[in-house]
Amino acid sequence: MTAKNLTKEAVAAMIDHTNLKATATREDIRRLCEEAKTYRFASVMVNSAFTAFCKELVAGSGVLVGTVAGFPLGQMSTVAKVFEAEFALSDGANEIDYVVNVSDVKDGKWDLVKAEMAKMTEICHFHNAGCKVIFENCYLTKEEIRRLAEIAKEVKPDFIKTSTGFGTGGATPEDVRLMKETVGDAVKVKAAGGIRDWASCKAMIEAGAERIGASAGKQILDEFRPE
């Protein structure tokens, strides 16, 4: 993908406006939602305790409500992730970003990884919600990233995502490109983690990202210049 001919509105519509901090207050989340409506971001991305609150605040605006499951470590049972996702979906979530079990990836338990991805995708799609699978690439080898993307190509969640933003590293154009080349048009790619300006956002888009997770959405748009 190229950033040429992109408008500021098109870029805004690719951004998940994010606040996943443990210290986020209701006022912080209220501000997040107001900004998302003003800038017409794709969604607000929050922890699940705020799902219903956000749903009320963005009602009628076209802004989606996204939340997370198994976040940020992914180190719990699939049953726990499913319960968390279903709770958020019942509160009105439109999208769920869940974290894979990196230990299962490292141990080569690909059958468990695939089964969990299939279950989470099934739950989300049953509720007409999007499913994003967070890889946490900073802990993975290139081959592990490729293998996860190959599984996603079979399972078909809506997005595969680079990072939680809470690991030792965030998104890189190299990883985005690898993920996109592996899944092709079967699954979209979301880049998240460390994207704080238009230059880094542009690099992710040109590498193949179709959604951007960022808490700096306003800064990205303020710096945007059409080519």
Image (cartoon, rainbow, N blue to C red):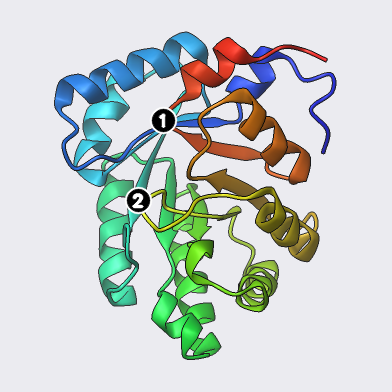
User: Circle 1 sits in a helix, a strand or a loop, which is it?
Assistant: loop
Relative side of 4 to 222, left or right: right
The type of residue carrying mark 1 is Ser
Q: CA distance from mark 1 to mark 2?
A: 15 Å
Point out which mark residue 130 bears.
Answer: none
| Vertical arrangement, residue 41 with respect to residue 150, above or below | above
- Label count reads 2
The quadrant in which the N terminus is found is: top right
Relative side of 181 to 124, left or right: right
Counting residues from the start of the chain, the first of labels 1 and 2 encountered is 2
Q: Residue at x 22, y 28 (%)?
A: 53
- Let me know if residue 184 appears in the view: yes
The residue nearer to you, when weighing 105 against 186, is 105
The residue nearer to you, when weighing 53 against 217, is 217
Point out which mark residue 215 bears.
Answer: 1
Name the residue that disc number 2 marks: 68
| Vertical arrangement, residue 98 with respect to residue 94, above or below | below
Residue 9 place in picture, x, y as percent:
65, 14
Q: Residue at x 64, y 75 (%)?
A: 151
The type of residue carrying mark 2 is Val
The quadrant in which the C terminus is found is: top right
User: Circle 2 sits in a helix, a strand or a loop, which is it?
Assistant: strand
| Vertical arrangement, residue 136 with respect to residue 54, above or below | below
Q: Residue at x 30, y 40 (%)?
A: 20
**Residue 102 location, quadrant:** bottom left
Q: Residue at x 53, y 36 (%)?
A: 195
Q: Residues within 10 Å of mark 1 (few under 14, many from 20)?
A: many
| Vertical arrangement, residue 217 with respect to residue 88, above or below | above
